[in-house]
């Protein structure tokens, strides 16, 4: 038996799975990751915490599994930027997280370049992406800029940071899926774009090498896990989940209900150009090679449930939401637009804030909880409709994963709203599975993706019930946008 160690470094924690060649999970580890909020709208991680929690989770998983894996696959929170000293691997300040909004004003100033950015990168000028984070660090730290220009500093997404640490600096590399989320990568060229690097003031030699998602990323030294092991696969979390769901060809679509919700529609070798505010991004083809996808990023999904628990105290656990939703027939006219850190696709309004509408004296906590679950489904419907219009394909089913996908009520509601079957795999950690598959394909553990997923089982939720008040949701979103843009359109 051969096995792969999958390292999944996420926004709120680091997960590790040891996955056998027959698809069984032999060991699992998890460590929570602290976040830091030094100012309103700022979100940071300690770079050492990113690595430490990943290694600790890996050791736990290996201890359970009792086997030595033949390779490592890495998947990670995307867009988050780490800066480190090339020679010593010392972090230079905290990592700026994808949720961070400190560069909103800088992004608004990029409006004249928006058409060029869309054409070159498939992305929009939003604080979500990596380039303005790097530019902010360089602008606010003259010594960092000097050192970056001298070649002493590396700026990388979390995958590149983990590779550098695992290989003790022998490899400084990222993959196409992560690179395509930076606003510095040319989609057609398949590499860093010199004009974009100049636009953001980022020295080319400060960026990692871009490599194929399934292939050689060096060897993790024995000091970390007790033995040497090759790193052979990397993909950003959403592209890894797409791959782990078996979505390898045009028309395949998945949604991950995690901290945010991320809908990806595979478009194969064809780059689809969105007219609906969606993103074009790199994905992986059947063999792990570069392909394309359309993506809709919904910034807040499961995080809204966490806020209901930790901020408002309406629930004791996320598991309570299904019982509360089933206990009432509707939301009583309440809609919750969870724009707690702005709105992502297809609106891209960084100034939007969370909005509750339709509240009456009869509104209860259960209504608000159900409205939060419905918001995940409504947002997904909004994005998938735009994808189908842009790509000209009609998916046959929606595959789902992420923590909230354990909620049967949500998936039933989602299927009804989409009038489309929703399929949930027996292993919800498809992000880690995708990273393992990419590494396993490179190392010959599996012949192809079909071989790797042969033992997987999917629960299927068929449409057939009421789909909810879509028009009411649209009015609620319009209200949120009016609040964000009120002075611009005569409000406030």
Image: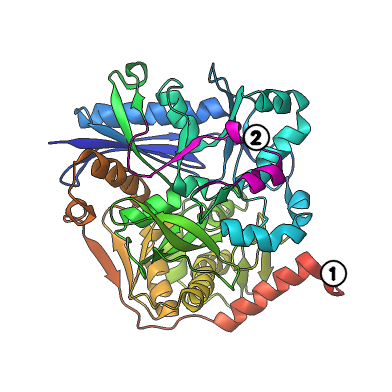
Farthest-out residue, left: 1
Residue 299: x %, y % from top left: 58, 57
In the image, which residues are magenta?
191-217
Q: Residue at x 76, y 65 (%)?
A: 484
Which quadrant would residue 175 be assigned to in this image? top left
Q: Looking at the picture, how far across and down is residue 133, in whole percent?
A: 67, 41
Q: Earlier in the sequence, mark 2 or mark 1?
A: 2
- Disc number lying in front (2 or 1): 2
Q: Which residue is mark 2?
A: 203
114 on left or right of 211: right
Eyeballing the image, is 412 above or below 140? below
Q: Are marks 2 and 1 in contact (CB under 8 Å)?
A: no
Neighbours of disc 1 within 10 Å: few (<14), some (14-19), many (20+): few
> Is 328 in front, or is 386?
386
Left or right relative to 273: residue 31: left
Q: Which mark is residue 488?
A: 1
């Amino acid at each position: 038996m051969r096995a792969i160690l999958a390292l999944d470094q996420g926004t709120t924690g680091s997960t590790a799975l040891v996955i056998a060649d027959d698809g069984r999970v032999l060991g699992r580890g998890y460590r929570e990751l602290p976040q830091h909020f030094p100012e309103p709208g700022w979100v940071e991680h300690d770079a050492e915490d990113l690595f430490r929690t990943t290694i600790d989770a890996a050791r736990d998983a290996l201890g359970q599994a009792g086997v030595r894996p033949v390779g490592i696959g890495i998947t990670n929170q995307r867009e988050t930027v780490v800066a480190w000293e090339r020679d010593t691997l010392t972090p230079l300040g905290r990592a700026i997280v994808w949720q961070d909004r400190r560069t909103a004003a800088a992004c608004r100033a990029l409006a004249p370049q928006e058409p060029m950015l869309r054409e070159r990168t498939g992305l929009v000028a939003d604080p979500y992406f990596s380039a303005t984070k790097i530019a902010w660090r360089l602008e606010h730290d003259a010594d960092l800029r000097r050192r970056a220009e001298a070649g002493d500093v590396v700026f990388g997404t979390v995958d590149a940071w983990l590779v550098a640490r695992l290989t003790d600096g022998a490899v400084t590399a990222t993959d196409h899926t992560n690179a395509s989320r930076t606003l510095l990568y040319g989609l057609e060229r398949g590499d860093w774009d010199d004009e974009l690097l100049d636009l953001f003031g980022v020295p080319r030699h400060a960026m990692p090498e871009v490599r194929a998602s399934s292939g050689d990323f060096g060897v993790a030294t024995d000091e970390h896990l007790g033995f040497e092991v090759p790193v052979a696969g990397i993909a950003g979390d959403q592209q890894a989940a797409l791959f782990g769901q078996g979505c390898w060809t045009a028309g395949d679509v998945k949604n991950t209900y995690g901290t945010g919700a991320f809908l990806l529609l595979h478009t194969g070798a064809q780059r689809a150009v969105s007219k609906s505010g969606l993103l074009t991004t790199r994905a992986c083809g059947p063999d792990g090679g570069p392909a394309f996808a359309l993506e809709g990023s919904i910034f807040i999904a499961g995080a809204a449930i966490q806020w209901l628990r930790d901020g408002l105290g309406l629930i004791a656990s996320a598991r309570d939401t299904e019982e509360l939703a089933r206990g009432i027939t509707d939301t009583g006219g309440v809609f919750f637009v969870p724009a707690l850190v702005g709105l992502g696709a297809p609106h891209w309004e960084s100034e939007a804030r969370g909005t509750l509408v339709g509240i009456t004296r009869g509104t209860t906590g259960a209504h608000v909880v159900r409205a939060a679950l419905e918001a995940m489904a409504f947002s997904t419907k909004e994005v998938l409709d735009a994808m189908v219009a842009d790509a000209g394909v009609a998916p046959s089913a929606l595959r789902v994963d992420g923590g909230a996908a354990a909620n049967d009520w949500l998936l039933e509601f989602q299927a009804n709203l989409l009038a489309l079957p929703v399929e949930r795999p027996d292993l919800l950690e498809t992000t880690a599975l995708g990273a393992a598959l990419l590494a396993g394909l490179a190392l010959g553990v599996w012949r192809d993706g079909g071989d790797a997923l042969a033992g997987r089982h999917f629960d299927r939720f068929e449409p057939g019930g009421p789909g909810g008040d879509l028009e009411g949701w649209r009015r609620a979103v319009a209200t949120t946008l009016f609040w964000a843009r009120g002075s611009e359109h005569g409000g406030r």
